[in-house]
Image (spheres, grey):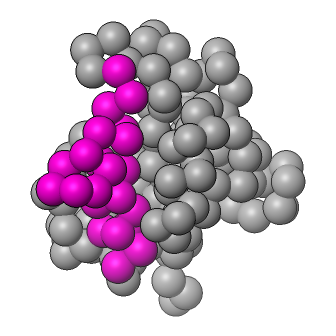
């Protein structure tokens, strides 16, 4: 049986009511988005990780730290009322239409959890696979 294709999606929009530009806020000298990018890149279970953002600066900083950001998220998916599910759906549609690729699972990786480790990601994927979740 072939290994499942698992896409990590990092949703990092530029706006925020509570803490404007929070994904670029520094934590121990690095922007918040840095920590999720590093954990995703070091995960052994993710096939690919994409940074989804509407903000050119977040995209630029994300790419500096090794993130793949092949598109700019539409403004209508970067509001306070936009759902993470809609962002994931947009990412999957973009990949399928632009690249003709599909993934078996999606792992949503919020930048606001900077203490997440690559092992945390891998353990979560293992739980998903062991449960044979859809």
Residue 33 among those drawn in magenta: yes
* Residue plotted at (50% across, 83% down): 3
- Number of marks present in the image shown: 0
> Could you say where residue 128 lies in the image, as x and y percent from the top left?
30, 62
* Residue plotted at (29% across, 39% down): 25
Q: Main secondary structure of the magenta part?
A: helix
Residue furthest to the front = 29
Specify whether residue 73 is in view.
yes
On the image, which quarter does residue 86 sit in? top right
Q: Nearer the viewer, residue 115 or 87?
A: 115
Specify whether residue 134 is in view.
no
Q: Nearer the viewer, residue 5 or 73?
A: 73
Left or right side of 45 for 126 = left
Query: Please, is residue 14 above or below residue 101 in the view?
Result: above
> Could you say where residue 96 lies in the image, as x and y percent from the top left?
78, 53
Residue 44 among those drawn in magenta: no
* Residue plotted at (32% across, 50% down): 31
Q: Which residues are magenta?
A: 20-42
* Residue plotted at (72% across, 46% down): 71
Left or right side of 108 for 96 = right
> Could you say where residue 109 lies in the image, as x and y percent from the top left?
36, 50
Query: Please, is residue 8 above or below residue 40 in the view?
Result: above
> Could you say where residue 129 lies in the image, as x and y percent from the top left?
33, 69
Q: Nearer the viewer, residue 97 or 81?
A: 81
Left or right side of 59 for 35 = left
Residue furthest to the bottom = 1
């Amino acid at each position: 049986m072939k290994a499942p294709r698992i896409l990590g999606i990092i949703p990092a929009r530029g706006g925020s009511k509570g803490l404007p530009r929070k994904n670029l806020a520094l934590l121990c000298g690095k922007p918040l988005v840095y920590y999720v990018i590093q954990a995703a890149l070091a995960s052994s279970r993710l096939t690919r990780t994409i940074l989804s953002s509407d903000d050119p600066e977040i995209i630029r900083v994300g790419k500096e730290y090794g993130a793949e950001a092949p598109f700019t998220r539409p403004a209508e998916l970067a509001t306070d009322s936009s759902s993470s599910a809609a962002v994931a759906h947009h990412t999957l549609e973009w990949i399928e239409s632009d690249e003709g690729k599909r993934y078996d699972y999606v792992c949503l990786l919020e930048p606001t959890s900077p203490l997440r480790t690559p092992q945390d990601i891998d353990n979560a994927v293992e739980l998903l696979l062991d449960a044979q979740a859809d």
